[in-house]
Amino acid sequence: MKEVMEKYKNYINEENLKTQLQILASTVPATINSIVEIIAYLRELATADKELIKEVITIVKITMVMPATNSTSERSFSAMRRIKTYLRSTILWFSMFIEILQTIIWI
């Protein structure tokens, strides 16, 4: 949570967030046990209630769109590496072919 607060400190007021988390903790039913249920609860709130916990909703939205891992970027680099390897091998073969042709032509 601290890392998120540091990264998005321009978007979230930390003091308001602390107060709003206390408000949310006192209003959330005890039957809610998972993040999915919390998000469903937040969606069902009236607009006026959502305004009272605006910072909480903002941090939930930020947290939900953050990737858990960097696998997408890793896959991109792997694909790029495969393409480079293919191009290098193709260019190497093509340049050897050109040299062979030049040798045959000059003989």
Image (spheres, rainbow, N blue to C red):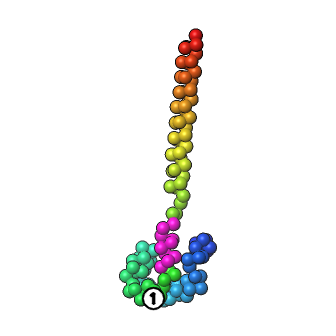
Residue neighbourhood size for the residue with mark 1, other residues' Cα within 10 Å, grouped as few (<14), some (14–19), many (≥20):
few
Location of the N terminus (image quadrant): bottom right
Q: Is residue 21 left or right of residue 45?
A: right
Query: As displayed, is residue 97 above or below residue 13?
Result: above
Answer left or right for 32 relative to 67. left
How many marks can you see? Answer: 1
The quarter of the displayed image where residue 46 is located:
bottom left
Q: Main secondary structure of the magenta part?
A: helix
Residue 86 on the magenta span: no
Furthest residue toward front: 106
Instruction: Give the percent coordinates (x, y) of residue 48.
Output: 41, 89
Q: Residue at x 53, y 27 (%)?
A: 94
Q: Which residue is mark 1?
A: 27
Residue sitting at 52 percent across and 63 percent down? Answer: 68
Q: Which residues are magenta?
A: 57-66
Residue 91 appears at what percent x and percent y? 55, 31
User: Residue 76: image x %, image y %?
Assistant: 51, 50
Q: Which quadrant, please, contains the C terminus?
A: top right
